[in-house]
Amino acid sequence: MLASGKIYPVPQFTRFSMRTFIYAAFLALFCFQYSRANVVSKFTHSPELADEIRFALFTKEAPTYGRSFTINSVRTIEDLGFDPSKKTVIIIHGFKANMFSDIIQHTKNALLEYDDVNIIGVDWSYFSPKFFIIRGYMSTIAYVEIVGQSVGDMILQLIDLGMNCDNVHLVGHSLGSHVAGLAGRRLKEHHHTAGRITGLDPAGPFYHMVYAKSKLSKDDAQFVDCIHTSVCFGDRSPMCHADFYPNEEEGYIERQPDCNPETLWKDWWNDYHSFAHKFFASSINPSHKFKVQPYDCWLSGKSTRTCPAVVQMGYYADPSKWGKFYTKTTDRYPYTEDEW
């Protein structure tokens, strides 16, 4: 066992030569360009593919499976229990996930228990291969832009039904973060701005290299906040009004809660990348307060008296507090510190 609180260095590409890395990068670029061309062609000639993006409205009357609809049946949503006067939270999964993945289910369950909002889950797993290889991942990336536009079009129809765009909160995990950002841009094209977008460990691998102009940005909503929990699978660069770095320090990442250092490489995806949505779902409970400090102040090694907690991370983040923030979580759910 490694000592508690020890910092683990970010893995370096020591086992691979620079030539191997360059070859892999060119392969990824080729796969992306080939995949994106196919995607655009498919959607141009088969617009019915948009129906493969499944939406579900979750209510207290339909809490488990929700009530399904598609982009072509949005206008029937009021018959399903949608209330345009309420806040609407739209939850979007990432690569290798679906409507029944933790990001949607845990977030939805917490919202049903602690808030009174419309909850819409977005399932775009049809375009996300279940195998984890470069070709499959790059193919999924190629669909992100079109899925984001479709989500934006769905929201535009909700606005036509009387929903206030200020009350829209998009929550995306991994590639779903960028889908949320692109949905926000779609709204802006029609002179609307979403109230908030939350990016939960926005996807990093290859995305910021070949698709940088389409990644989540602080310009995509009135308030954009991100929780960064991994280095290998997430984009750690600050891209939001408020960027939160739980259990991280400059150039290094501490072990996230419940992670086993001895199986770090095997469990990296689940143990690090998924903790962003675990922290967020926990924060929906008003008693679970993730109090954070200014990032630079924490790095300077000053005490909590000198660097007091200034804002909360997660669902109740303050839209008026911008910058980079740090917090250290506990080892078990609900992951919040008792004292500061």
Image (cartoon, rainbow, N blue to C red):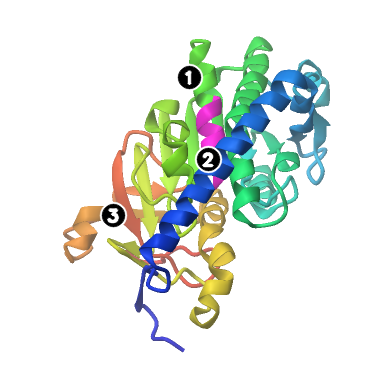
Instruction: Please name which of the two marks, 1 or 3, marks the residue nearer to the observer.
Output: 1
Verify CB contact (< 8 Å) between mark 3 and mark 2. no
The residue indicated by pointer 3 is 293
Residue 163 belongs to the span the image colors magenta: no
Residue placed most toward the observer, 82 or 127: 127
Q: Look at the image and tell me whether residue 90 can be seen.
A: no
Q: CA distance from mark 3 to mark 2?
A: 24 Å
Q: Nearer the viewer, residue 60 or 232?
A: 232
Which secondary structure, mark 2?
Answer: helix
Q: Residues within 10 Å of mark 3 (few under 14, many from 20)?
A: many
Question: What residue type is disc 3 on?
Answer: Gln
Q: Earlier in the sequence, mark 2 or mark 1?
A: 2
Q: Secondary structure at mark 3?
A: strand
Label 1 and label 3: CA atoms lie apart by 29 Å
Task: Determine which of the numbered discs, if any, sits on residue 177 in the image.
Answer: 2
Q: Residues within 10 Å of mark 1 (few under 14, many from 20)?
A: many
Residue 308 position, x and y percent, is 24, 56
Q: Would you name the residue on which mark 1 appears?
A: 193
The amino acid type found where label 2 is placed reads: Ser
User: Residue 26 in the image: x percent, y percent?
Assistant: 47, 48
| Real-space CA distance between mark 2 and mark 1, rounded to the nearest whole angstrom | 16 Å
